[in-house]
Image (tube, rainbow, N blue to C red):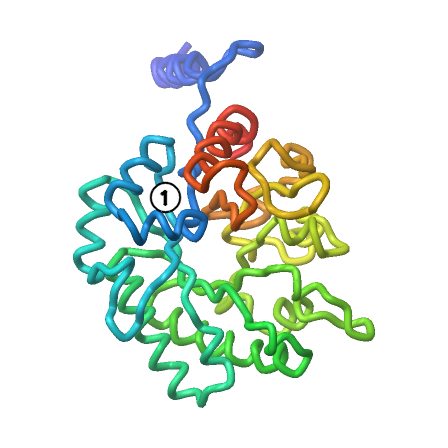
């Protein structure tokens, strides 16, 4: 055998030796950080921000989605953006997305909306976020006319946020899936916004609660666009929120392929209906997720 071929063969053999042996169980490091939407424990964050973040980090949460930004004061939980950044850096955790209060600006002139978007961009940059997320529409805004307006505003803000070097996404609830003579708000949002400017954050609880499509089917319709997920369970009797593992959603069965989805971040969340307390609920959900679902992510 020529020397060059011999060296190549030995290198290939060495690489093969590093591959997992069939049937041999290796510890799999999760691809994604375990995330938490901080709305779940908003009161605790307002009362004792530092102690609460220490506690949730100890539960295994590494990445967070923020809630409660004050654009005029440039604060998170009462801390100036720079002060809050120091807290998360000292704790060696990350904040990759934020839910920002865009809803009151839907009916405002574009320049007013863009001014608020600039405030959000400044806040997001201060925390080194990757995404700014529009999370909500007020009840009086949930009409087909407002969904059409929303699509226009999402494209507008998406262009502004993208130009600033950040990602922009819309987070669904259940009201987007309500049918109005064969149309619904989610179809308008997903079909009439630019996929390059407006990504989607899929709340799987609300998809299972209100949509005629499964999470996998939604991803199949627009692969690569669902860059973030919210994961929470549904009470078997009331269909309200509940801790992971206590409800009716079989996540091992309904989770889409993260690569096909375009997934970058996911967040556990529980918006209410706590069995004991918000902190106990997220601890229980974290334990269940690590034992039963983290292997998929």
The residue positioned 52% from the left and 50% from the top of the image is 271
Image coords of residue 169 (percent x, y):
49, 63
Image coords of residue 285 (percent x, y):
50, 34
Number of numbered callouts drawn = 1
Q: Is residue 55 left or right of residue 167?
A: left
Picture quadrant of residue 144: bottom right
Above or below — where is 129 with respect to 287? below
Picture quadrant of residue 67: bottom left
Picture quadrant of residue 159: bottom left
Q: Give the camera-side residue of 274 and 38.
A: 274
Q: Give the camera-side residue of 21 and 34.
A: 34
Above or below — where is 216 with respect to 5? below
Image coords of residue 40 (percent x, y):
45, 48
Q: Is residue 191 left or right of residue 71?
A: right
How packed mark 1 is, by other alpha carbons closer than 10 Å (few <14, some 14-19, many 20 or more), is: many
The residue positioned 70% from the left and 46% from the top of the image is 238
Instruction: Write down the residue under mark 1.
Output: 63
Q: Is residue 113 left or right of residue 246?
A: left
| The residue positioned farthest toward the right in the image shown | 181
Tell me the SS state at disc 1. strand
The residue positioned 29% from the left and 42% from the top of the image is 53
The N terminus appears in which quarter of the rendering? top left
Image coords of residue 20 (percent x, y):
49, 15
Above or below — where is 261 with respect to 167? above
């Amino acid at each position: 055998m020529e020397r060059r071929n011999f060296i190549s063969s030995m290198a290939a053999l060495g690489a093969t030796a590093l591959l997992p042996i069939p049937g041999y169980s290796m510890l799999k490091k999760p691809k994604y950080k375990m995330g938490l939407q901080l709305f779940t424990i908003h009161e605790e964050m307002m009362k004792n921000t530092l102690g609460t973040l220490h506690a949730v980090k100890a539960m295994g949460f590494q990445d967070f989605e923020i809630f409660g930004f004050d654009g005029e004061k440039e604060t998170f939980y009462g801390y100036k953006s720079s002060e809050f950044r120091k807290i998360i850096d000292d704790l060696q955790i990350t904040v990759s997305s934020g839910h920002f209060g865009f809803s009151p600006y839907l009916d405002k002139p574009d320049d007013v909306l863009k001014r608020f978007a600039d405030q959000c961009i400044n806040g997001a940059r201060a925390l080194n976020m990757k995404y700014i997320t529009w999370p909500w529409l007020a009840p009086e805004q949930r009409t087909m006319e407002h969904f059409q307006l929303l699509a226009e505003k999402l494209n507008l803000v998406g262009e502004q946020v993208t130009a600033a070097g950040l990602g922009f996404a819309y987070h669904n609830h259940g009201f987007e899936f309500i049918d109005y003579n064969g149309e619904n708000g989610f179809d308008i949002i997903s079909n009439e916004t630019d996929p390059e400017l407006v990504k989607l954050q899929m709340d799987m609880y609300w998809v299972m609660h209100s949509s005629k499509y499964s999470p996998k089917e939604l991803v199949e319709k627009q692969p690569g666009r669902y860059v973030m997920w919210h994961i929470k369970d549904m009470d078997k009797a009331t269909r309200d929120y509940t801790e992971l593992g206590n409800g009716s959603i079989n996540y091992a069965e309904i989770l889409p392929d993260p690569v096909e989805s375009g997934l970058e971040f996911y967040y556990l969340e529980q918006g209410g209906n706590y069995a004991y307390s918000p902190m106990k609920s997220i601890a229980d959900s974290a334990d269940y997720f690590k034992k039963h679902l983290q292997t998929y992510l």
